[in-house]
Amino acid sequence: MEKKGRDEQKEAEDQVVNPWEVTAKDGGKIDYDKLIDKFGCQRLDEALIRRVERLTSRPPHVFLRRGVFFAHRDFIEILDAVERGEKFYLYTGRGPSSESLHLGHLVPFMFTKYLQDAFKVPLVIQLTDDEKCMWKNLSVEESRRLARENAKDIIACGFDITKTFIFSDFDYVGGAFYQNMVKVAKCVTFNKVVGIFGFTPEDHIGKISFPPVQAAPSFPSSFPHLFSGKDDLRCLIPCAIDQDPYFRMTRDVAPRIGFHKPALIESSFFPALQGETGKMSASDPTSAIYVTDSAKEIKNKVNKYAFSGGQDSIENHRKYGANLEVDIPIKYLGFFLEDDAELEHIRKEYAAGRMLTGEVKKHLIDVLTVVVERHRRARAAVTDEMVDAFMAIRPLPNMFD
Amino acid sequence: MEKKGRDEQKEAEDQVVNPWEVTAKDGGKIDYDKLIDKFGCQRLDEALIRRVERLTSRPPHVFLRRGVFFAHRDFIEILDAVERGEKFYLYTGRGPSSESLHLGHLVPFMFTKYLQDAFKVPLVIQLTDDEKCMWKNLSVEESRRLARENAKDIIACGFDITKTFIFSDFDYVGGAFYQNMVKVAKCVTFNKVVGIFGFTPEDHIGKISFPPVQAAPSFPSSFPHLFSGKDDLRCLIPCAIDQDPYFRMTRDVAPRIGFHKPALIESSFFPALQGETGKMSASDPTSAIYVTDSAKEIKNKVNKYAFSGGQDSIENHRKYGANLEVDIPIKYLGFFLEDDAELEHIRKEYAAGRMLTGEVKKHLIDVLTVVVERHRRARAAVTDEMVDAFMAIRPLPNMFD
């Protein structure tokens, strides 16, 4: 039945996925197969994951082997370059809209850290404080403050300061970066951004001006202090798939202005506690586990809000088992329980009805408490001086070692 | 008859004056009275000119007393501020589209230098290399090169380096300047810029993004190295009236983002040699005297192309006199012959038919040759080091002295 429901949904054309809205049809699940078709990206298949494993001489990240990062564009060209002994650089980012991040916000950064470590490559992280100032109507000052606060959470993910440059648009846009923004903007008409992003003539020109800001970091010449004389360096962008429109535009423009198209590796959305119907909402604190939640809050939220695929009575549960397809604790364990054997054991026992929802939630609470506690400790150790150091405009002499 | 022709033209609604097009109806003259009404600016009247004379203790500039600068917005507020013992700053600019400037290009800079000297105030000069890169489809590199070349001509006008900061957008946009761009952009919809500038949905988003770039220098906080802690400093913009749309937009936005509206003092257009039907065309070298023209070229151009209001025969000329309203040598002398008595004498003799076109042209050739020769010598003395010095991002500790 579940299968049939998904096939039916595939027929509809009205799931909306763009940087500002993620909505499935009728409150259902996002259809990622359909998204791949619609966006024109490629599925990240098993052969590719094995190739990453071989090239990096380490097990593929949980997010890779469990399909969290499930789609790509030209990732094969990045691996081809690596095989030829060439380097690349990573680019990811965050729109600093809220003071404290939830677990979904950490997903791209945890994965990006793995990529940085595994491929030993430099990384630029863009904090789009200008975007949030415009879309959330925050003041410039508040947006910049949030950018620095978010930078602390990002640094807490363990990035290597000798290979990582974090910048906020309000501080960094200018010079070569601005020149690349103009080069991009010259190639994109208003009609084009209407088609890609759904802007309207009533939108302010700040929004209409923004896509080139997110495009520019895809080009090494936007960072002369890092990549001077390395205009041919390829760029790989790990991000959630809702950011794909920016980079479809970027990839369309790149060859016309003499640059490589950036490659992408794209994730699905981390589900809300209430169920897998899109992204979590920063405005509903019960929809997500925050990195600032206490152990008690985590326990309460999981027990109270995490949507269960278990049956409505113990008798029925023992008889029919849990529906793992809709069970949020199982989904969350898929992200954060690293031990494959243990996860498989829980899934099997739960599906068979031998394990109850309460026990699975207990597992999840333990796992999340460790993740959040580890993050909190790491973040507490991040000083303002460290933020300054990561955000300093400086060369990174050992970034390719 | 001339008078009637102008009245008729007033009825029409189709003269076009914007930053990219200046076209009068049916090849006639621009109707500046109508422009003042349409744009909603004020006429710069005799009382105001007398007030400038009194406040600066020096004769008003030729361009003021002869009505070249003929319109303003809130110039009275600037003079009120001066009377209270307050300072202001000047902002002007240039789109560096061509290698060598013609005399019309010098007009705003000559006048701005007078204002700087007379009021003893700092000046920022914006070189919109980004605009020209976008509108003329020049490369970033070529636009930046032209900006530096044009900077030499601007410096040759005699600006005081202790009070003058010259910047190019491609080099300077960023930080506080970019933050002000975003503040402006948030207040202006696409529909609004369509109304002001005539953009269409087929225009690229670089054009649509540009108006905030020209707005930002109107606010002192865009220049923290100059005006830190002086957010209340007023700005006066001397410019040709075709730039008014940018500053109508800027003035509309300013109070909404907590800034003073910039004041404006606006000039008519320097006429082409062939007649007063708009601005000169950079693409037609016979339409203008260039600052690089030799004495021989000046002589040839004036004699061959300068439209004459004299009669078609000496007999008729002696009988009817010259029509000064259409005579280009007389117009040009009005810009560049500083001696009021001499100009009046020429006008009188020429209008009465006692002086012939050839004699007036001879006067003009003498005057222009001196102006151009003086500029050429001044420009030849401008070194790359001087350009670097004017464009260095630096405080100007004595800018208000």
Image (cartoon, coloured by chain):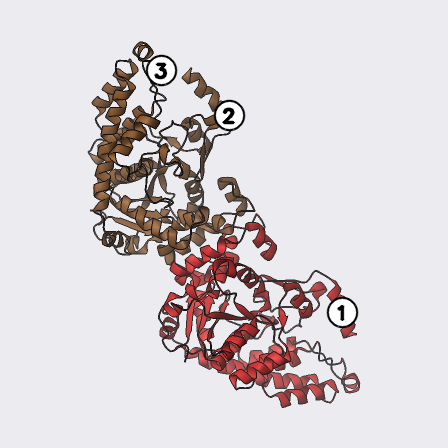
Chain colours: A red, B brown
Q: Where the C terminus of chain A falls, by quadrant? A: bottom left
Which of the numbered marks, if any, corresponds to residue A7?
1
Q: Which residue is mark 3?
A: B312
Which of the numbered marks, if any, corresponds to residue A360?
none
Amino acid type, mark 3 = Asp
* Discs 1/3, front: 3
- Who comes first in sequence, dot 2 or dot 3? 2
**Dot 2: chain letter:** B
Q: Which residue is mark 2?
A: B12
Closer to the camera in the image, A256 or A92: A256
The 10 Å Cα crowd at callout 3, few under 14, some 14 to 19, many 20 or more, is: few
Please report the residue visible at 26 percent of the width from the left and 16 percent of the height from the top: B355
Where does the image place residue B284, in percent across and percent down from the top left?
Answer: 39, 36
Side of A126 relative to B273 (left or right) = right
Q: State the separation of the CA atoms marked 1 and 3.
A: 88 Å
Element type at mark 1: helix
